[in-house]
Image: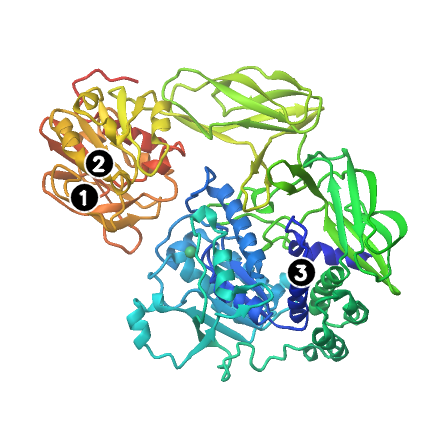
Amino acid sequence: MRFLIALICCLTWQLQAQKPKKPSSSEIYEQIKGLNFLGSALYVAAHPDDENTAMISYLSNTLHARTGYLALTRGDGGQNLIGPEIRELLGVIRTQELLAARRTDGGEQRFTRANDFGYSKNPEETLEFWERDQVLSDVVWAIRNFKPDVVINRFDHRSPGTTHGHHTTSAMLSVEAFELANDITRYSDQLELTDAWQPKRLFFNTSYWFYGSQDAFNKADKSNLVKVDVGSFYPAFGLSNTEISALSRSQHKSQGFGNTGTRGNQIEYLELLKGEYPQNGNLFEGIDTSWNRLSDGEAVGTILNAVEKNYDFKNPAASLPDLLNAYKLITKLEDKHWRELKSLEIIEIIKACAGLYIETATSKQTATANQKIALQIEAINRSEYPITLESITLLPSEKTLAISQNLNFNTRYSKSVEITLAEATLTTAYWLTKEGTEGMYAVADQHLIGLPETPKKNKAIFNFRIDDMLIPITTDLIYKYNDRVNGEVYEPFEIVPKASVEIKEPVVIFPTTESKVITTNITAYTSNINGIVSLQVPENWKVSEPQKISISNKGETKSLKFTITPPKNASEGILQPIINIDGTDIFTKVVTIDYDHIPLQTLVLPSKNKLVRLDIAKKGDYIGYIAGAGDAIPESLNEIGYQVAQLNVSEITTEKLNQFDAVVMGVRAYNILDELKYKQSLLLDYVSNGGTMIVQYNTARGFDFENLGPYPLHLSSDRVTDERAEITILDPDAEILNYPNKITSKDFEGWVQERGLYFPNEWDAAYTPILSMHDKNEKSSEGSLLIAQYGKGHYIYTGLSFFRELPAGVSGAFRLFANMLSVGKNNQEIKP
Ligand SMILES: [Zn+2]
């Protein structure tokens, strides 16, 4: 039993798709073919969506190789097209989208501890954020654990600067890890948990993209490229490989990567980087991928090749006697790696051939530690083969329920039991429990590194006796209910704290010494909680007294209001709500993420908010805002006391504009709102009559807007991605840097993700450039903030990333934005 529990704990990630698999007869046959293939491939790239799903599906479904995709990051740095989650929560969604993609194309998913911190231009910049040695160690760890025969890179390790720095870095680290994985002097701590491993071949999965154009690729010398046709058709699934690939790619819904399938031949090109060139085009040439690969595998192969040959599509159970004989031999194999993998694989096939269904359903989706919950156990044998359910072992308690029940043909066995949940099995994403750095997640437990999810701890092992063998089949505890519209719904069962405590606004801004009333929400995750809620604020801030709270019903949320008073001077710090229940402090909030294409996600995260007392003055009160692609600038301006009116394009009239102290265009407004063309002259007239107009970044590609400013202005793709890049002030006396707030280099400290993007690179002499900045080893750009007097008013174009900085509570960005809004109002009374 010890061995089994250890085995289950290290391989559980394979079994976590929460909906039970119910393979058809032809799908079982494909699984048997996979059982008879002993070879594996690992695809390596940087982000969710980098992976070539046609290649992964080909390796997995055509060749039947065990196939992994190692994405160095979880894609936290991107945009979310389906909801409000960004950063870490977006990383959680994209992790699940990768798992959904792998469930579709048959691959397995792996990661490293690298965090997708945003765009970087080259590997040098990437490695300023990623700890090179840690990420390399994780790639080596992935290779040593997965033991691939073939490693395939998505990107070219030899062309830094031609694509995202994360991409090139993924390829460079993979090339390096290829040999290091077999070097026992490197990362030797890992070797206490796994063995060194030398893959046989390393490829780069090239395409026309890397040659600049389809034409250049057509003409290129391809003698060193292996050609693979990935257009197979699978009668068992009724789909072409390329159709499966599109279904897999379409799981990347947060990125809007819905993809239409194609049919017919499709050639993929693999450039050999290391190992011997495969003359016959077979990626596994020279590697024995049959059972003969193992010194004691021949007998297994003899049995299982016959199972494959004689498989009866009308009666899969006819294969059971041979499968059981093979299982007995597999559990005795010397090679631990293949023994563990193939044991799990053949158990799944035995289960499917017997039409054996098992389930352990909880009565609630969540529960708290030490709580009693009801479990509904089901087991049914839908074959005539004699099977006895001997016992069920519950994890993590290891408590065993003796059962000894013969499972007669198609007769359902069910049982209700009540269990007490163990402590310390709290649900959450393991990589988010400790604070990491901008470029790295902190994960202390080496066993967890690389796993896509936190292994579930609450499980049931069904111990079946079939013939003379005890066969354990493990299943997660799941929550199941009937939805009136969707029918049967499965959700992961989760253990959460007794309560969640949360303040909605991630950043609370105090533009003056005036107090603010903050709402704290408390949600009960068990019935009848009584607690004391308090807020922790930084030194020299003040907060009102702790308050008692009682909530009777599980799932109910109540709110308490607290008054926070900032200090006199500028200050920043953490605001932490706490609820004390029965002497225990809870500092966390429970966050759920619910989308149709991924399992319900429940996360227990630190409940932390940011407090900012700004030293800020402003002029003007009433701002007109024309939203572009969407940003939170209006809310941020509200926080510092502006009144913001959001306008549709059709509402832009001279009369309306004249009410505003300034008009601001949201990010990418001119890219998105075609009709702005017809309003631009009204807007520029407003400026000429004394108004202030601020235009935030627009993307340069295909941009053909004639009169973006009152004078000629040309957008480029110049960007400064290093948020710490030094800023040179070109014109220290410029009004925009002095009134009403004196802007100094200190105001450019603490910026997040980047300085700015799509800066103009040419402009009319009527514009004054204010700032100069550049990324390492690049030319300076002076186009980040341009201002021009036009008639009696002012026009400002800025690619600075205010849309990121203001919601993050960056005080210098607030002060500069207030100055932009206040330009030309020097003679008016200054407001705090
Ligand atoms: Zn990418």
Q: Quadrant for ligand 1?
A: bottom left
Whether the residues at callouts 1 and 3 have beta carbons within 8 Å, the answer is no
Q: Residues within 10 Å of mark 3 (few under 14, many from 20)?
A: some
Are circles 2 and 3 on residues that touch, CB within 8 Å?
A: no
Height in image: 4 above or below 800? below
Task: Work out how far the residue at label 2 is from the one at label 1, CA to CA, in angstroms.
Answer: 10 Å
Q: Secondary structure at mark 1?
A: loop
**The disc labelled 1 sits on which kind of residue?**
Phe
Residue 304 percent coordinates (x, y): 73, 74
Q: Quadrant of the N terminus?
A: bottom right
Give the mark nearer the N terminus: 1 vs 3.
3
Q: Label 2 crowding class (10 Å Cα cut-off): few <14, some 14-19, many 20+? A: many
Q: Are marks 2 and 1 in contact (CB under 8 Å)?
A: yes
| Mark carried by residue 705 | 1
Q: Which mark is residue 24?
A: 3
Residue 432, x across and y down, in percent? 56, 43
Residue 676 tag number? 2
Residue 244 visible? The answer is yes
